[in-house]
Amino acid sequence: MDLGLEGKVAAITGGGSGIGRATALMFAAEGSYVAVADLFADRAAAVASEIGAAGGRALPVQVDVAQASSVMAAVQAIVAAWGRIDVLVNCAGIYQRGTIEDIGERDWDHVLDVNLKGTFLFCKFVVPVMARNGGGAIVNVSSISGRTKSDLAAVNYVASKAGVIGLTMCLASQLAPKGIRVNCVAPGTIDTPMNVDIPPEGREVLLRRCPMGRFGRPEEVAAAILFLASPLASYITGETLNVNGGVFMV
Ligand code: NAP
């Protein structure tokens, strides 16, 4: 099926690993120009090389999404290379487990800065670029932890991911007149480097709660992101799509 993403310029934060990497590869396979933005330049470069080796078009971009000056420079670099940005996927994120006693002020600030402020900053600097070119699509990455109670995730992670859903709805209504759709995915537990240190007993608990009885694959979240970014979702905005094997349903 043609998703209508050929020739589009897609910027993927956190594109160097896990869900972001899978999303970058999938956009490239659809014929999009892909900016792979990540904290570590070598990780972004590795994914960009992977795309290039498969015949795709990719630009590695080093960025710290928590720093406005770094995000501004990243957006400028993408526009300098390709002249536009049609799709933004805010996938960069960090995770923390624990109780409120474990979370200090620095932990709170760090997780909120990357997950929530980082999403805000990328939207802020990309929106004028999209608006100039007649519109675009933004897909943010929240979490099941932002929608319902979480047994493992800490308060800072949960608050950041609930914030991403609120930010998505607010921007969706503000930006609709500019032709920009803003949506969100809320993954359950996905097999990525973020989850390598879940202890075996924790994995058991999570698997028992999942009607599908398994963790998700990064490609399964990427597929939902591509759908929301594509013209197939042309009348969908402000939505948060669960990708969680049935663990949480609304
Ligand atoms: P991942 O494999 O750790 O990928 C996240 C990427 O974001 C990493 O390359 C990471 O670099 C990068 N990153 C972290 N801080 C950054 C910063 N300040 N600036 C730019 N890039 C930064 O994790 P993932 O599982 O694919 O997670 C992707 C997104 O999905 C996250 O937002 C996460 O919260 C969300 N999510 C994941 C799951 C899951 O079960 N995996 C479930 C729900 C939601 P470093 O590795 O150096 O930190």
Image: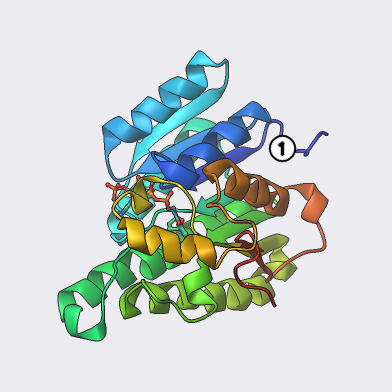
Q: Indicate the position of residue 7 as horizontal and vertical percent values.
A: 68, 31
Reply above or below: 186 against 99.
Answer: above
The residue at which mark 1 appears reads as: 5
Percent x, y of residue 139: 59, 57
On screen, residue 121 versus residue 209, left or right, reads: left
Judging depth in this view, the residue of 211 and 127 nearest the camera is 211
What is the quadrant of residue 36 in the picture? top left
Residue reaching furthest to the bottom: 101
Say how the picture is coloured.
rainbow
176 vs 70: above or below? below
Q: Position of residue 40 (x, y in %)?
A: 27, 40
In the picture, which quadrant includes the N terminus?
Answer: top right
Q: Residue at x 50, y 60 (%)?
A: 207
Type of the residue with mark 1: Leu
The residue under the point 40% across, 79% down is: 159
Q: Position of residue 92 (x, y in %)?
A: 40, 53
Q: Is residue 94 visible?
A: no
Q: Residue visible at 29% across and 69% down? A: 97
Q: Is residue 107 above or below residue 62?
A: below
Residue at the spot x=61%, y=34% of the render?
Answer: 26
For disc 1, the neighbor class at 10 Å (few under 14, some 14 to 19, many from 20) is many
Q: Depth check: 111 or 209 in front?
A: 209
Asked whether the viewer can see residue 250, the reply is yes
- Going by the image, does 98 lie left or right of 21? left
